[in-house]
Amino acid sequence: MPSLWRPINGPVESWPLALCDGRTVSPTSLIASERLRSTWSGGTTFVLHEEGNKWYFMSNQRNDEVAIFKNFDSKEDVAQYAAHSSFELRSCYPQARPRESIEVRAMVFTYPEHM
C-alpha cells in the first residue's frame, strides 16, 4: 500500500515528514497496537527508537515535491513498511507556518508471474 504525501501550503517550515530506512529497523523494536473506535477498529505499529535507525526528510519541502513511501507490503522478503513520523525542527523560528499536508493511499494488487 503506497502513500503519496505532500504539503499543501509549502514550503514546510515546521514539523516535516520523516521517513525511516526500513533496513535499519529491527523486528524487536516493533510494537503492534490496536485502534478501537465506536464504528471501526484497525491496527497500527509503533517503532521504538534504536541507535542504528536512519531517518530522512526533505528540507523546506515544496508543494510540487511529493514523498512516496510504503505503508504496507504483504511480501515477507522485502521491507513491509516505512516507519514515518513528523518531528520538531530545532532551527524552526517562532513565526514558522504550521505544516498543512495531504496524504493519499492506494491499494496495489499484483499476481504471481505464473498466472
Image (tube, helix red, strand yellow):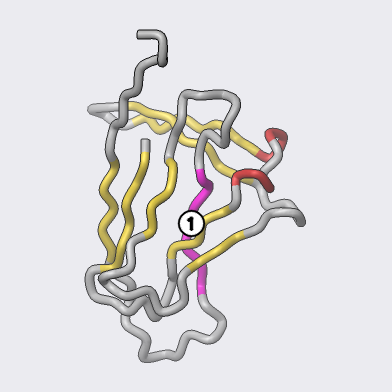
Query: Magenta stretch containing residue 6, yes or no?
Result: no
Q: Residue furthest right?
A: 51
Is residue 61 positioned above or below 109 on the image? below
Q: Residue at x 68, y 34 (%)?
A: 27
Q: Residue at x 43, y 30 (%)?
A: 43
Residue 81 rendering spot, x and y as whole percentages? 50, 39
Is residue 45 positioned above or below 89 on the image? above
Q: Over which residues does the magenta segment extend? A: 82-88
User: Could you tell me which quadrant the C terminus lies in?
Assistant: top left
Residue 65 placement, left or right of 74: left
Say which residue label 1 marks: 85
Residue 40 rendering spot, x and y as whole percentages? 28, 27
Q: Residue furthest front?
A: 114
Query: Can you tell which quarter of the image residue 11 is in?
Result: bottom left
Q: Nearer the viewer, residue 100 or 55?
A: 55
Residue 91 rendering spot, x and y as whole percentages? 53, 86
Residue 34 rendering spot, x and y as whole percentages? 46, 30
Q: Residue at x 51, y 33 (%)?
A: 33
Is residue 96 positioned above or below 52 on the image? below
User: Could you tell me which quadrant the N terminus lies in?
Assistant: top left
Please count the marks in the image: 1
Is residue 69 positioned above or below 17 on the image? above
Q: Residue at x 43, y 69 (%)?
A: 16
Residue 16 placement, left or right of 90: left
How packed mark 1 is, by other alpha carbons closer than 10 Å (few <14, some 14-19, many 20 or more), is: few
**SS at circle 1:** strand
Q: Residue furthest top?
A: 115
Q: Nearer the viewer, residue 25 or 48?
A: 25
Query: Can you tell which quarter of the image residue 72 is in?
Result: top left
Amino acid marked by disc 1: Ser
